[in-house]
Each structure stands twice: as C-alpha cells, then as structure tokens.
Image (cartoon, rainbow, N blue to C red):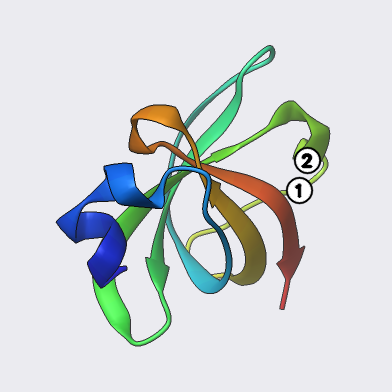
Amino acid sequence: MDKYLADYRSMTGAKFKADLKVSADLGWKAETGRLMVFTLENDNRRLVVLIPPKLSGLYFTKGQNYQALLEVGEGGLVYADACEKE
C-alpha cells in the first residue's frame, strides 16, 4: 500500500495478493463492473478496486473479508483478477 500511494505509476502492471475488508460499494455498470472501496488488513487507508463483470457473481457486504489477486492498471486503477470470500 505504501509503494502504491507513494507512486502508483511505478506499480503499473504489478500483481499482488491482498486481504481486503469491504468498506463501501460505489456502484455497478454492466459493461465496466463494480467499483468497491476496501481497507487492507491492519491498514485503515482505503483502496478503490474495480471488480470486473467476469466476477459479477460476488455479493459484497460492508465488513466482509476477501482475499484478492489485484493488478495495478494504467492510471493507477486497481483491478481484481480474482476474489474469494474468506
């Protein structure tokens, strides 16, 4: 999280696993996906993640924990490549 917040450009293309806690749902658009706000385990800073349409079967509730495979995309947007409820 520190590296990403310090300079997201240097993280573009990087993939990593993260333990996430649902903070908020910012909305859904069928062709784009769902934009979610999470916090990381032991870190109260918020991370916005785009959940793509291929993961549309997931239902997020505030406070739930997930393990996710994330990728930093162009412009710093974080995408979920995979996501599992813990």
Count of residue discs: 2
Q: Tell me: residue 18, above or below residue 8.
A: below
Quadrant in the picture for residue 64: bottom right
> What's the amino acid at mark 2?
Leu
Where residue 25 sits: x, y (%)? Answer: 46, 42
Quadrant in the picture for residue 83: bottom right
Instruction: Kindly identify which numbered label has been placed on residue 58.
Output: 1
At horizontal 68% and vertical 33% (from top left) the residue drawn is: 52
> What's the amino acid at mark 1?
Leu
Q: Pick the residue in front: 66 or 74.
A: 74
- Viewport quadrant of the N terminus: bottom left
Looking at this view, name the residue that lies furthest to the left.
6
Are there few (<14), some (14-19), or many (20+) residues within 10 Å of tag 2? some
Label 1 – label 2 distance at C-alpha: 6 Å
Instruction: Kindly identify which numbered label has been placed on residue 46.
Output: none
> Seen in the image, is 24 located left or right of residue 16?
left
Which residue has dot 2 on it? Answer: 55
Looking at this view, name the residue that lies furthest to the top.
31
Q: Secondary structure beneath disc 2?
A: helix
Q: Secondary structure beneath disc 1?
A: loop
